Amino acid sequence: MSEQTPKPIELNLTASDGESDGNSQGQQSPGQQGSHHPHQAQSDDRPVMGYIATTFGVLSIFMWAIVFAPLGIVCSIIALFMGQGMWAFIGLATSMIGIITSPFWWGILGLAALANWLGFGF
C-alpha cells in the first residue's frame, strides 16, 4: 500500500468568456456549471424601488392620497439613495401631484382659510 498524495484543488475565479479551461471534451467541472443556480442570488439591475415609488405616486393621484402619497415620497427618497434618480423624480412628482389634487388636502387648506377668516389664525 503506497500512500498517494492528494491533488491540489484549482479554483478559477475569473469570468468565463467561452474559452476552454483545458478539458479536451469541453465539459464543465462540477464547480463551473453555469452562472445561474436556482439558490444563488442574482444581481438585479432593475430599479424596483423606483417602480414602487412611481406606482404609489400614480395611486395617490387616483385614490387615497393620504396613504399613498407619503409612501410614494418615502420610496422616492429611498430610490434616490439607491441611485435610481429618474424613477425617484417621477415617483416624487406623481406623489406631489397626488397631494395637490387630493380632496383631503384641499379640505385642510379650506379649514385653515376658514379659521383665518374667522379670526382664529395663529
Image (tube, rainbow, N blue to C red):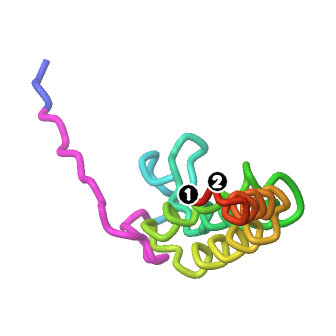
The residue positioned 76% from the left and 61% from the top of the image is 114
Q: In the displayed structure, does residue 4 sit left or right of residue 55?
A: left
Determine the image quadrant of residue 73. Answer: bottom right
Q: Residues within 10 Å of mark 2 (few under 14, many from 20)?
A: many
For the magenta stretch, what is the residue range?
5-23
The residue positioned 58% from the left and 73% from the top of the image is 88
> 99 above or below 120?
below
The residue positioned 14% from the left and 30% from the top of the image is 4
Which numbered dot is residue 71?
A: 2
Q: Nearer the viewer, residue 112 or 95?
A: 112
Residue 64, percent across and down? Answer: 82, 52
**SS at mark 2 in the image:** helix
Residue 89, percent across and down? Answer: 59, 78
Residue 99, percent across and down? Answer: 73, 65
Residue most extreme to the bottom: 86
Residue type at tag 2: Leu
Residue 17 magenta-highlighted: yes
Q: In the displayed structure, does residue 90 sit left or right of residue 27?
A: right
> 69 above or below 97?
above
**SS at mark 1 in the image:** helix
Looking at the image, do the residues carrying marks 2 and 1 touch, with CB atoms under 8 Å apart? yes
